[in-house]
Structures are given as structure tokens and as C-alpha cells.
Amino acid sequence: MSDQPRRPRTSGKPYRRPKKDPVRILAFEALRAVDERDAYANLVLPPLLRKAREKEGPEKFDARDAALATELVYGTLRRQGTYDAVLSACVDRPLGEVDPPVLDVLSLGAHQLLGTRIPTHAAVSATVELARVVLGDGRAKFVNAVLRKVAQHDLDGWLERIAPPYDEDPEDHLAVVHSHPRWVVSALWDSLGGGRAGIEDLLRADNERPEVTLVARPGRATAEELLDEDAAVPGHWSPYAVRLTEGGEPGAVAAVRDGRAGVQDEGSQLVALAVANAPLDGPDRRWLDGCAGPGGKAALLGALAAQRGAMLVASEKQTHRAGLVARALAGNPGPYQVIAADGTRPAWRPGSFDRVLVDVPCTGLGALRRRPEARWRRRPEDLEGFAPLQRGLLRTALESVRVGGVVGYATCSPHLAETRAVVADVLKQYPDTDLLDARPLLPGVPDLGDGPDVQLWPHLHGTDAMYLALIRRTG
């Protein structure tokens, strides 16, 4: 028998094998992992890119290939809501009836057509070739037909057709235009306090790729050392922060490889610094990070504690995350202890600590820049699941700190149900407490509101939307 591919009987043209495009195949594989395994792109993509860079031959990635694959994955996930609305207008059946792998290919094509500068012909042909490789010729024809419809308008043209007018339904308009679920738009708007300009700026910021921010761990590395890296500039607010402005690879930084520095959003750094510097009455010898995984804040707190002769206890419920905390703290210049313990059932006596931080589990709506898929996974009912845990952890923190000591309650969510509502509810049960004004502990940071708590924002501060309330035990 001949090894030559057979020519399809329905065509007069010889069969042509599809061209394999390593960049788009990798992007498709990442999207499938996010969809099938509920994986996070920021965890799935790096090992895929590393493996591609290690290959020899034509499939080996260079820096431009890695940048394009990253843009295709993150851009597709960020704009998924908008692209779904566009594709719904181009497909003759509900999107829920389209096979998920086909929908992933269509979304990749829509992003290339509507969200990048890739020429129309190249975007369509490259996506159809991808479909032939990963889906087969039959479904590739469907992909081709749909993308040709998508290509009839640019993004602005599509938004005029698919988004309801702002005056008729402002929340739905913003949800479609800025690719956020409607309930998330509503929640963020409530947290901001109204006004169209602010919410649009925030939603735009959520769709921008954030810079990589490093932290120089005190006593082990300096910001000046990190600034010697290519395209490194100082952070906006934290004295330990350095930003890699051109998407630099943190693993290429010696101090990061050695554990003397780490990757940490500047908002997270500011929370740790505020807790470390909050005024308290009495001794300052024992600190607790009550929700320490995966270890970024614990590593910074441990380094700051070491400078003052204090000891940090880092507690994390999940054993594997406690291992990550131990790795982050390895080499800390002062005493520390990592324990695997349930923060709502403390393994220590009441009043054991001078400073306590609880960065509680939450919906993560403040980090949608970094985890764009989270906006599509979260549901309003998730708030009810987190509420008891958040209140329980704050109660334990208040019982774990001595009189005169300070508790920091933090979340990476600006949702009022996870921030001020939790603090207000719990403090009703603890009248012998004072809310401290956290704003002076973030020197130089503007737009911090009326206090006493602090809400950071991507569009105002260039950070994740971290929330912090500082509470002193008075009795």
C-alpha cells in the first residue's frame, strides 16, 4: 500500500496535511487545561512554555513565540464574555451546544481578529489550520465559516451590535463591553461607590496584563540589587518592590532563584508592611500569619520580624500549602515556625501574639488581572460559602492577639460582603477593640478614601484590589 495520503473523494484537490503551529497549539492546550481541569492559566502556562523552550528543532520557542502564546491565552480568557457574545451572533445554535474544544478554537480566533494586530487573513487561516490539527477537517470548516462572520466587523463595530445601550441597562452594557459577569460589575460598582468613570477605569484595568512585581526580602536582598536586572524599575509604593516592565522572567533573577527575593504584588507587600508597622502597646516579640499559604506575605513578615528580634509563626491549614510557606521562609535571617493548623481551631493559647495577620480565603475578585478565568468561575453564592470561614478566622485572630496588640484583616477581594461587612459583624462581638486608621501606614499612597480601613485598586494604585482593616485589642 502507498504511504501517500489519500485524496478525499469529494474534492478535486490533493489532500494537504495541516501545518502545525506550535504557538497556537500550546495556547489551545492551556485553554483546554483551564476548561477541563479548572486549572489556572498562571500555573498551567509556565511549565508548557518551559517545555517548549527546551525542545530542539523547529518547534523550539523563542521569546517572541512565548510572548504571543501568553497573549493568546490571557487575552482570550480576559475577553471571554465579549467574545462569547460575538460568537453567539455568528453561530446558528446556542454556544452551550458547541463542543468545548471547538469553542476554545473559535475564541482563540476571535481574540486574534478582535484583540490583536494580527492581519485578518492570517488570523483566520492560522486558526483554521489549528482546527485541522486539533479538531479535524470537518470541524475546521465550521470554524472557518464562523470566523469569516466574526471578521466582518472590528471590536467596536461588534460592541455597537451586541451590547445593550448604557442608558437602558448600564450593568449589562459594562458587562459585555468590558467582559465581566454582570454580578461582578454590580459588586465592584457598589464597592467603588458609584460613578461611571470609576467603574469603567477599574474594568479596563482588570483587562490589562499586570507587570511582574518582585519583593526584596529585607536582610537578604535589596531593591537596588534587583534594579540591576534588565527593564527593572522601582515599585510605586513599597520600598521593597521592583517592577519588571517588559514581562521579564522572574526565574532568571538570581535573588529569586535563591529565595532572597520573590514575586509579590505591591498591594500584598503594602498589607504586610502596614501590619508590621501598626502602633501597638507593649512588647513586640511574637507575630502570627494565620493564613500563610502560599507564603509571600509570610516571607516578608518573617524578614521584617527578624530585623526587630521578633519571631514569626506561619500557620496554614493545607499541608501542601504549608510546604510552600516553609519554602518561602527558608533562609529567613531570624527565628520562625511553620505549622499546618486550622486557623479557626488554633494550635496556640489565646493572647499569644503581639501582631496577627489573617489574609482570609475569598472570591479573589481583586486579582482578576492575574487570574482572568476566576471571573467566569465565581458565582454570587460563593460569598455565602466564604462568609463563615472569614468571620471565624477574624474571631480567632482577635482572640489570639494580646491586649494592646494589633490584628490585620485582609482580603484580595473588594466585595463589601467580604470586607467591611465581615469586620463590622465580628466587632459587634468584640466591643473591647478599636479600628485603627490604616491610611498613614501606607505613606505616599493616594486615593485611600475616608478610612479607617483601606481599599487598594488596580486603576488607582496599580495593585491588586487588596483590602485591609487594622484592629487593636483594648481589653
Image: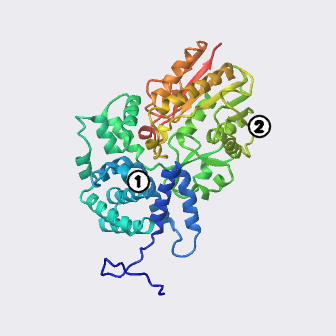
Residue 64 visible here:
no
The quarter of the picture where residue 169 lies is top left
How far across and how far down the image is residue 94, in percent?
32, 49
191 with respect to 283 (left or right): left
The residue that appears at 55% across and 29% down in the rendered structure is: 441
The reply to whether the C-beta atoms of the residues labelled 2 and 1 are less than 8 Å apart is no
Looking at the image, is 256 positioned above or below residue 376? below
The residue that appears at 57% across and 41% down in the rendered structure is: 239
The residue that appears at 58% across and 70% down in the rendered structure is: 55
Q: Which quadrant of the figure contains the C terminus?
A: top right
Disc 2 target residue: 335
Q: Badge 1, how many Cα within 10 Å: few under 14, some, many 20+?
A: many
Amino acid type of the residue that numbered disc 2 sits on in the rendered structure: Pro
Disc with the residue nearer the chain's start (2 vs 1): 1
Viewer-side residue, 383 vs 131: 131
Q: Secondary structure at mark 2?
A: loop
Nearer to us: label 2 or label 1 = 1
Viewer-side residue, 431 vs 339: 339
Check the image and tell me how it is coloured.
Answer: rainbow
383 with respect to 348 (left or right): left
Residue 204 visible here:
yes
Q: Residue furthest right?
A: 335
Q: Secondary structure at mark 1?
A: helix
The residue that appears at 61% across and 30% down in the rendered structure is: 358
Looking at the image, is 234 positioned above or below residue 99? above
Looking at the image, is 336 positioned above or below residue 258? above
Viewer-side residue, 415 vs 462: 415
384 with respect to 191 (left or right): right
Find the distance from the CA under tag 2 to the CA under tag 1: 45 Å
Disc 1 target residue: 76
